[in-house]
Amino acid sequence: MSDLKKGIILVGHGGIPKGFPADLVSKLKRLEAQRRAAGQPMSAEELELDTKIRTWPRTPETDPYQAGLEALGAAMKPMVNGDLFALAYNEFCGPTLEQAVEELIQQGAQSITVVSTMFTPGGSHSEYEIPEEMEELRKRHPHSTLNYAWPFNLSQVSKMLVEHISQF
């Protein structure tokens, strides 16, 4: 039996909470687009807006996406054999993937597997952003094993969806 402490991070997209000012969302998305086009790091202004939206007060009524990911995480956690477990979000909600990885490492995780709720290929978060962030985190934590459980086996996803459909 291995005494390697493992962790799992379930990453969801993240949603804009009801009540968050729309003009600030527009400004954040504009700054993000400019940064990506220029290949630059996040500006102080973008970081401030990103932090503001990620830490905005939420309830299941104002952010049903967060409530849904938390419910999925609560159902999944007992199935991971006692491994450390955390949630993370790509955008609009916290914690970030970086924050979740740091937290699990602080809790003693030596091997962390990240899994996205985004099953299909073609999405920028699952296909590009998460792998890029994972590479940076691997450089920062060379003594930790950081795995990304993606892409999904589409035959297995299809089977799960067909089994779900059969209930209706």
Image: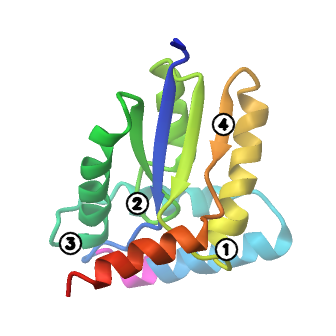
Q: Residue at x 60, y 64 (%)?
A: 152
- Mark 4: which amino acid? Leu
Neighbor class of circle 1 (other Cα within 10 Å; few <14, some 14-19, many 20+) is few
- Mark 1: which amino acid? Ser
Percent across and percent down for residue 85 are 39, 37
Pick whichever of labels 3 and 4 is earlier in the sequence: 3
Q: Which residues are magenta?
A: 20-24
Q: CA distance from mark 3 to mark 4?
A: 33 Å
Q: Residue at x 17, y 66 (%)?
A: 60
Percent across and percent down for residue 57 are 24, 58
Q: Which residue is mark 2?
A: 93
User: Dot 1: what SS?
Assistant: helix
Q: Which residue is mark 3?
A: 62
Q: Quadrant of residue 37?
A: bottom right
User: Dot 3: what SS?
Assistant: loop
Apparent side of residue 166 relative to residue 5 in the rendered image (left or right): left
Q: Are marks 2 and 1 in contact (CB under 8 Å)?
A: no
Above or below: residue 164 compared with residue 135 = below
Visual colour scheme: rainbow
**Mark drawn on residue 146:** 4
Q: Are marks 4 and 1 in contact (CB under 8 Å)?
A: no
Pick whichever of labels 4 and 1 is earlier in the sequence: 1
Q: Quadrant of residue 42?
A: bottom right
Q: CA distance from mark 2 to mark 3?
A: 12 Å
